[in-house]
Amino acid sequence: MAAFNKVNQFVEDVAHGVHNLATDTITVALCNTAPTGSDAVLADLTQVSYADCSSRVVTTTSSSESGGLYKLVLTDLTLTSSGTVGPFRYVVLYNDTPTSPADPLVGYYDYGSSITLNNTETLEIDFDAANGALTIQ
């Protein structure tokens, strides 16, 4: 999987208590344009249609700190299409729990080129179980 890129606003949101990554609902959004430095919430992005896409909710495996290093471990997610989904290049993690701000962005993965899922095709989003989807030090 591509490297994780944090969204700049995520740093301030963590400092201001917007996220509780242990219990909040993390979800993926699919976009064909990369988030920019000024993008802070899901509404700032142009997403693909999810009419033919399976659930995009991610399961948190663990959220813990050891020796000053926080690590968020997420369970791999398989997206399945029942029609056409895409094209998209970026898989964006956002927090679906907060209401103010609503749906703050966490970060994204760049797949390098656009992907379209046709009927019955799948895409496994392989979060790094050993190193975590993201770390904070």
Image: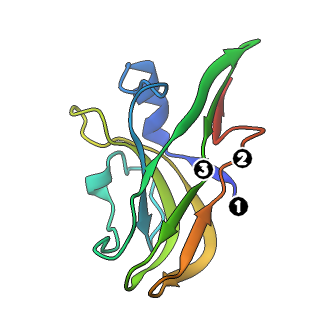
In front: mark 2 or mark 3?
A: 2
* Image vertical order of residue 42 relative to residue 118, above or below: above
SS at circle 2: loop
Q: Quadrant of the C terminus?
A: top right
Cβ atoms under marks 1 and 2 closer than 8 Å = yes
Q: Position of residue 88 (x, y in %)?
A: 47, 75
* Mark 1 → mark 2, Cα distance in angstroms: 8 Å
SS at circle 1: loop
Q: Amino acid at mark 1?
A: Met
Q: Quadrant of the N terminus?
A: bottom right
The residue under label 1 is 1
Cβ atoms under marks 1 and 3 closer than 8 Å = no
- The outermost residue toward the left is 99
In the picture provided, is 81 more to the left or to the right than 98?
Answer: right
Q: Quadrant of residue 97?
A: top left
Label count reads 3
The residue under label 3 is 5
Q: Position of residue 33 (x, y in %)?
A: 44, 70
Within 10 Å of the Cα at label 1, are there few (<14), some (14-19), or many (20+) other Cα atoms? few
Tag shown at residue 105: none
The residue under label 2 is 128
* Mark 2 → mark 3, Cα distance in angstroms: 14 Å
Look at 55% across and 75% down and name the residue there.
122
In front: mark 1 or mark 3?
A: 1
Q: Amino acid at mark 3?
A: Asn
Q: Position of residue 102 (x, y in %)?
A: 24, 40
* Mark 1 → mark 3, Cα distance in angstroms: 12 Å
